[in-house]
Image: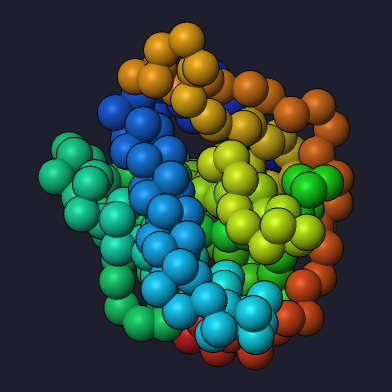
Amino acid sequence: MKTKKIPTQEEVREKLGEEFISRFVESVEGATADFKAFKKWHPDWAVSFSSRFIANFLHERIWARLKENASNLDSFEFVDKEPIREVHLGTELIMRIKRHDSNDRISSYPTRGAQEFWNIDFFTIPGLESFSLALGYHWDKDLREPQDALLTLYRKLNEPIWSVKLSRDSANIETITWEPITNPSLPEIDLAEALAEDYRDVAS
């Protein structure tokens, strides 16, 4: 079987385009602001929020904002058929929103659906190769808040190929910085998300 040519960070950046990347970062920033507003509205509720609830809330808000901000961009398709939510760029790039810990490990439960989705060689037709990307964010477990936006390409569920941190340039807020992360760590199984992830992946 012919081995796929794995896209580089710059090739993916060029395919996604600066407009989509900027709108994704805006969506993570907006979701973070939404979460802070929610906590401010009812701080007595916030103290008992579980990690799973926070992750689900953030994913809902990132998805809603990204769909609103970027669905008008050419060639991008938003697949919103619960429990599946994905952003497609043609047939080549398929993206899901994922949370990463401070060591750049992805939060996921190893269901069959998840393993197939993140397996770079699963169901490959010559000339119609596709790659699964994690549109994510850094999670600060001490602050219990999202940090920088993140983009990661995986070979398999437990084998990240490369990861890039996306953030605003402090000198020019209109510019998104693209900061490659050296040797991203292996994924961590996050049991706090297990049930929700299992439900989403069984149908994928």
Indicate left or right for 108 with 90 as reference. Answer: right
Residue 65 visible in the snapshot = yes
Q: At which x and y percent is residue 2? A: 65, 40
Residue at image point 59% right, 53% down: 146
Find the residue positioned furthest to the top.
171
Give the color scheme: rainbow, by chain, secondary structure or one colour.
Answer: rainbow
Residue at image point 72% right, 76% down: 109
Residue at image point 36% right, 41% down: 26
Q: At which x and y percent is residue 174? A: 34, 19
Residue at image point 14% right, 45% down: 72
Residue 122 visible in the snapshot = no
Q: At which x and y percent is residue 50? A: 66, 82
Viewer-proximal residue among 140 and 113? 140
Q: 166 above or below 160?
A: above
Q: 100 above or below 110?
A: above
Q: 146 above or below 86?
A: above
Q: 34 above or below 202?
A: above
Indicate left or right for 22 with 169 as reference. Answer: left
Viewer-proximal residue among 132 and 55? 55
Q: At which x and y percent is residue 179? A: 63, 22
Q: How many marks?
A: 0
Viewer-proximal residue among 176 and 180? 176
